[in-house]
Image (spheres, rainbow, N blue to C red):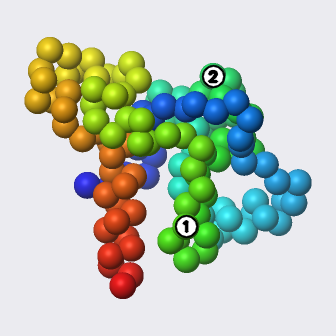
Amino acid sequence: MTYDEGQVIPMPVAHGEGRFVTADQDVLHDIKKNGQIIFQYCTPEGEATSEFPWNPNGSTDAIAAICNREGNVMAIMPHPERASFVANLPYCPEKIDASGDIAMMRAPSAANNVFTSMKRFIGERQ
């Protein structure tokens, strides 16, 4: 499974102080130009936003995860490990659709793909 550009991935946010900020606009320009923004906080419709509650911490440009230039190190604020299976998801359409179906509730969620895609990416680089 791979992510599509603009795909909304429900995952828990559980932090009170961490967020991406920079006073240096050149840094922001460079990470955008280099494709280093991995995830952004967004509305349920997939629009990146700085508005609470969708961007819970005021992160610059709604940035939720970035990577280094090589793409093998990621810094991420949301917690995909807390939503690896449908049963662990916050209230969202994917969980509602699985309601009452134990096999669907035990299935990997879209957040689980954070880990499988990292493993695949690193494996392809070796």
What's the amino acid at mark 1?
Val
Q: Which mark is residue 29?
A: none
- Residue 94, can we see it? no
Residue 36 position by quadrant:
bottom right
The kind of residue tagged 2 is Pro
Where residue 115 appears, x then y in whole percent?
37, 55
Count the labels in the image: 2
Q: Nearer the viewer, residue 47 or 3?
A: 3
Q: Where residue 85 appears, x then y in whole percent?
A: 28, 36
Q: Which residue is mark 2?
A: 53
Q: Is residue 96 left or right of residue 20?
A: left
Residue at mark 1: 73
Quadrant into which the N terminus falls = bottom left
Screen quadrant of the C terminus: bottom left
Q: Residues within 10 Å of mark 2 (few under 14, many from 20)?
A: few
User: Label 2's element?
Assistant: loop
